[in-house]
């Protein structure tokens, strides 16, 4: 009999009330979706094994974190694996195995304790309790726990009777589970199907007509063919329902790339609406060949409404759709300046941006955080679609990539999205496979690394929408420069201080799951443009 | 139809020109100023309501139509009851609806067919994208006919069924919308209610609700007990997904929405647009009056929303209660024209100024936004307003026009010229199928910032003609 020594490693338990308030106020730095929640929410998954609970838990968590609602998954299987070091067989899950039942219940209680810590002390807003939760008894326990702690509860039940879907699930994620380290596929399948049978005996699905009519829940039937939604209480639950109704499990790939190198890129200028350089045009031609080569079924092509992405798409010779919300981050008063110019003119702004690049908003412009809000409908639509190629911009691409690769606010603004490179994202198991295709057309490097010394400073002031850079005392409002036909040259143009960088040649790097390290820029002290 | 689908006829790459009105880059050949349709769906969609009388079908149809039109999807509702009233000039009694009334059945069938013909006209010929077919459609047979019709014409079908057995809700419905109905113009309330209840009975025996098994291949949403529960089956595309999300967020709990602008700002006084200035002294006075107004109104659980611009926040600060800031509520971005007076815009950008007057809804400021962009930006605000109960939104002129247009079902022509004066609160209360508006002027003087469409919108016009309607300022 395995005694329970410890629970799986989670965040430290050192927090106090004030820490939670601190964290909460930090997070509440205007995260647009944060307003949707007041009391913490406990999302409880329900369903037999191999019904996609963990898939939905992880995806939902990734989405909620991306829109700025601190969310965490608590997977009961992981707790069980901690408690029972080695899994022998499905016998453990028999409902008449008293000893095992005791252990499993104990694990649930430990997991719920961690949920409580996360939501009450560590600044979490939503906890996803990923377990089968197939009996009314277990669910009542959870509901009582939530009530005691003033958490709202929302159930997500996955019901599926399509044997093909179930078999595919098992192959996709169970075969590689820690429970089955060395088994061959067939015996895994056999054992797992028996495991499911153990649960079926005591499974009590949610009953919307009588017993569970006052609970808030969504029942997902047959992988999204049908949904039953009961008593949605607030906006965040409504958003969760909308999200779950838009995701699917069909195989598809999303291609992300930036426009070809632009004239502004050549000069190291931010933003603006310039056209492609010669090399940029060449990239567009290469992109066309790439698309043909990959023979993509029913590919949709999306661009922003800025000239450089549209010019790139034009070359492909296929229909494309323009989205204004895919436009590059608005640099406000810094539009069309180079970094050197910004540093000279607004040194304090420049410094502040390095302190907290995610939350920093350009005067009269946007922040990465604003960008995420703006891009949310794109993500929702990408979830609905099949194969899509999105031709966008550096900051935009970082935001989209961060969603797919589950990168937080710290890493997002420093992800590497070089010009003339296409990223292919394919959902696999619980994450996303990334393949990088360098189309071998030279371009400038527009990436600015994280500064070496990260000084611990108080969070930057949050600019509402003023045109005044927070630092400047100069009260004269400057009109924004624009290039619409008449291009008014800026005061001084320092010579470009960069060399065009050769991106690593012809390497198709295939990354598994969530770790894509080439996109988290290390602090190399590289000279920035 | 996408922007460049006739690429098949041309060589690549094509030269790009920027449409001067909407600032959209298009291949050279398409440089005419066309109305770019929102690409939400490839084929037209036919939404079909299902349900016994007094279940909120018309309420849902009208609301949904209003929402879809506002977000730019051309939508029209076709109420079979209206067709029946056209056909059968005088309504006598519920007997008309008895299932054994052969002639009644014939006439009703004809009306449905007539309506479907108009649907076909709207979707296939007139450029409509969504048609809402509002009728009881309670039998599988009738629904089958409609689905066949849709298939023949290449329309997708989505059913919206409303199921409700709560007698209180039904009674409320009848009082709210049936008593004022042309059918019951000449009866007393009691007679009307009695007759209507009999009418419902006529449908009940033959009612075949959408069934999980028998209708498993049909796309639909079943709304139960006014939104307490939903069953959603086979959503196939983006527009259906949006419709489901919308329907799941609306409610009928009585409440009011208060819309107003920030108090008069320093830039307002100078006749300048945009920017991020603070309140003038009169603006501050307004904020105080607003506070008194709210206290008088004694509004239950009022939520207060502002933009992230100084002037709305300063206004809210005076109220002494918590408020929430939304960046999406920020004023329209006037791009290069920010902080300019209309006179200056005319002086520096006379072409832009004229284009704006030609099509104020679609016109996008250089490096800025259009009203059309604003609507897209405000859609989440509308969605959240639908979920909420009592809310006060302190915003800006263009923003307020967009929100108001949604609630009052104004077209894109009317929207940019809606009157939203400073220091005036609009109280919107949903009633029957629409919205009651009460305008409350809080008695603090301010400049007028409303600029009507001038007579001469020609790009060659004189400065005098261009500035004809500019309101007075310092």
Image (cartoon, grey):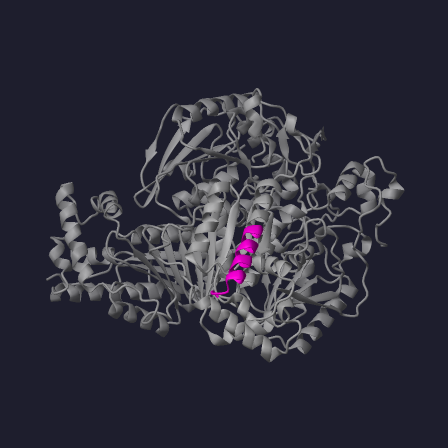
- Frontmost residue, A415 versus A135: A135
Please give the count of numbered marks on the rendered protein.
Answer: 0
Residue occupying image coordinates x 25% and y 67% = A109
Question: Image check: B22 left or right of A163?
Answer: right
- Image quadrant of residue A327? top right
> Residue A224: image x %, image y %?
36, 51
Q: In the drawing, does residue B367 fall left or right of residue A211?
A: right
The spot of residue B434 in percent (x, y) is 63, 64
Q: Is residue A446 left or right of residue B361?
A: left
Which image quarter is the N terminus of chain A in?
Answer: bottom left
- Dominant secondary-structure state across the stretch colored magenta: helix
Name the image quarter holding the C terminus of chain A. Answer: top right
B444 versus A255 height, above or below: below
Q: Residue furthest front?
A: B102
Region of the chain picked out in magenta, as a range:
B99-115
B81 lies left or right of A250: right
Q: Residue at x 45, y 48 (%)?
A: B147
Picture coordinates of residue A312 (x, y %)?
A: 54, 28
Q: State whether residue A452 appears in this view.
A: no
Residue B268 in view of the camera: yes
Q: Eyeballing the image, is B36 above or below B203?
A: above
On screen, A212 above or below A420?
Answer: below
Q: Quadrant of residue A123?
A: bottom left
Q: Is residue B55 magenta?
A: no
Is residue B114 one of those drawn in magenta? yes
Q: Depth check: give the residue in front, A88 or B361.
A: B361
In terms of depth relative to the viewer, which is nearer, B251 or A151?
B251
- Residue B137: % across, % down: 48, 58
Q: Of residues A15 and A520, which is closer to you in this image?
A: A520
């Amino acid at each position: 009999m395995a005694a329970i020594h410890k629970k799986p490693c989670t965040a430290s338990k050192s927090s106090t009330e004030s820490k939670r308030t601190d964290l909460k106020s930090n997070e509440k730095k205007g995260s647009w979706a944060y307003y949707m929640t007041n009391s913490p929410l406990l999302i409880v998954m329900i369903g037999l094994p191999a019904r996609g609970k963990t898939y939905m838990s992880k995806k939902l968590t990734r989405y909620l974190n991306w829109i700025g609602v601190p969310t965490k998954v608590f997977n009961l299987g992981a707790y069980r694996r901690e408690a029972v070091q080695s899994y022998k067989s499905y016998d453990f899950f028999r409902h008449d195995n008293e000893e095992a039942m005791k252990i499993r219940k104990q694990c649930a209680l430990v997991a719920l304790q961690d949920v409580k810590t996360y939501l009450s002390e560590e600044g979490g807003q939503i906890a996803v309790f990923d377990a089968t939760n197939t009996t009314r008894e277990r669910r009542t326990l959870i509901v009582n726990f939530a009530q005691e702690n003033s958490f709202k509860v929302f159930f997500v039940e996955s019901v599926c009777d399509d044997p093909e879907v179930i078999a595919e699930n098992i192959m996709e994620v169970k075969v590689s589970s820690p429970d089955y380290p060395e088994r061959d596929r067939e015996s895994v399948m056999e054992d797992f199907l028996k495991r499911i049978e153990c649960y079926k005996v005591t499974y009590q699905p949610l009953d919307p007509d009588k017993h569970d009519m006052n609970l808030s829940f969504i029942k997902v039937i047959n992988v999204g063919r049908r949904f039953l939604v009961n008593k949605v209480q607030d906006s965040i639950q409504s958003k969760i329902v909308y999200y779950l109704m838009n995701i699917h499990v069909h195989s598809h790939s999303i291609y992300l790339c930036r426009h070809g190198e632009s004239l502004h890129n050549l000069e190291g200028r931010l933003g603006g609406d310039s056209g492609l350089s010669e090399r940029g045009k060449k990239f567009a031609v290469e992109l066309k060949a790439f698309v043909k080569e990959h023979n993509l079924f029913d590919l949709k092509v999306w661009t922003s409404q800025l000239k450089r992405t549209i010019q790139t798409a034009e070359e492909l010779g296929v229909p494309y759709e323009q989205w204004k919300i895919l436009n590059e981050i608005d640099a406000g008063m810094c539009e069309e300046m180079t970094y050197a110019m910004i540093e000279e003119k607004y040194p304090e702004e420049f410094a502040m941006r390095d302190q907290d690049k995610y939350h920093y908003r350009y005067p009269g412009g946007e922040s990465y955080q604003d960008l995420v809000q703006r891009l949310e409908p794109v993500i929702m639509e990408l979830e609905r679609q099949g194969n899509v190629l999105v031709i966008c911009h550096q900051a935009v691409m970082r935001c989209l990539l961060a969603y797919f690769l589950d990168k937080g606010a710290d890493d997002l603004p420093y992800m590497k999205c070089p010009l003339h490179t296409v990223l292919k994202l394919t959902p696999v198991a619980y994450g996303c496979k990334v393949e990088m295709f360098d189309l071998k057309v030279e371009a400038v490097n527009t990436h600015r690394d994280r500064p070496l010394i990260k000084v611990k400073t108080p969070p930057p002031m949050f600019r509402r929408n003023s045109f005044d850079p927070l630092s400047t005392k100069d009260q004269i409002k400057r009109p924004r420069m624009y290039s619409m036909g008449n291009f008014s040259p800026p005061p001084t143009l320092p010579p470009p201080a960069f060399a065009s960088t050769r991106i690593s040649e012809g390497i198709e790097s295939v990354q598994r799951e969530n770790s894509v390290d080439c996109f988290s820029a290390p602090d190399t002290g590289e000279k920035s443009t | 139809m996408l922007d460049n689908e006739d690429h098949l006829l041309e060589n690549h790459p094509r030269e790009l020109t920027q449409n001067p009105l909407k600032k959209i880059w298009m291949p050279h050949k398409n440089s005419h100023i066309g109305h770019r349709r929102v690409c939400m769906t490839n084929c037209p969609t036919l939404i079909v309501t299902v349900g016994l009388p007094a279940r909120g079908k018309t309420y849902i149809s009208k609301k949904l139509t209003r929402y879809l039109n506002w977000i730019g999807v051309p939508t029209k509702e076709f109420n079979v009851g209206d067709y029946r009233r056209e056909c059968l000039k005088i309504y006598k009694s519920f007997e008309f609806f008895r299932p054994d009334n052969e002639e009644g059945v014939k006439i009703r069938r004809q009306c449905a067919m007539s309506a479907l013909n108009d649907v076909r006209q709207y979707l296939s010929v007139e450029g409509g994208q969504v048609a809402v077919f509002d009728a009881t459609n309670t039998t599988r047979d009738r629904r089958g006919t409609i689905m066949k019709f849709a298939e023949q014409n290449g329309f997708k079908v989505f059913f919206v069924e409303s199921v409700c057995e709560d007698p209180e809700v039904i009674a409320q419905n009848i009082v709210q919308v049936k008593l004022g109905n042309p059918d019951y113009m000449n009866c007393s309330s009691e007679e009307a209610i009695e007759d209507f209840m009999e009418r419902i009975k006529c449908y009940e025996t033959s009612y075949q609700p959408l069934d999980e098994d028998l209708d498993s291949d049909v796309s639909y949403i079943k709304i139960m007990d006014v939104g307490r529960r939903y069953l959603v089956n086979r959503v196939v595309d983006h527009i259906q997904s949006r419709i489901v999300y919308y329907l799941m967020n609306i409610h009928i709990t009585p409440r009011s929405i208060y819309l107003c602008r920030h108090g008069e700002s320093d830039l307002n006084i100078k006749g300048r647009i945009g920017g991020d200035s603070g309140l003038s002294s009169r603006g501050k006075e307004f904020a105080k009056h607003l506070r008194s107004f709210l206290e008088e109104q004694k509004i239950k659980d009022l939520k207060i929303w502002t933009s992230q611009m100084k002037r709305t926040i300063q206004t809210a600060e005076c109220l002494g209660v918590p408020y929430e800031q939304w960046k999406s509520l920020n004023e329209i971005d006037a791009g290069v024209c920010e902080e300019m007076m209309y006179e200056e815009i005319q002086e520096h950008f006379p072409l832009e100024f004229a284009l704006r007057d030609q099509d104020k809804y679609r016109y996008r400021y250089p490096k800025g936004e259009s009203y059309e962009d604003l609507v897209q930006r405000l859609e989440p605000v509308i969605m959240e307003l639908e979920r909420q109960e009592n809310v006060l939104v302190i915003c800006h002129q263009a923003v307020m026009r967009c929100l108001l247009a949604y609630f009052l079902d104004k077209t894109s022509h009317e929207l940019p010229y809606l009157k939203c004066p400073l220091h005036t609160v609009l109280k919107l209360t949903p009633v029957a199928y629409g919205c009651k508006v009460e305008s409350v002027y809080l008695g603090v003087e301010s400049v007028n910032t409303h600029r009507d469409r001038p007579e001469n919108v020609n790009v060659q016009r004189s400065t005098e003609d261009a500035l004809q309607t500019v309101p007075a300022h310092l």
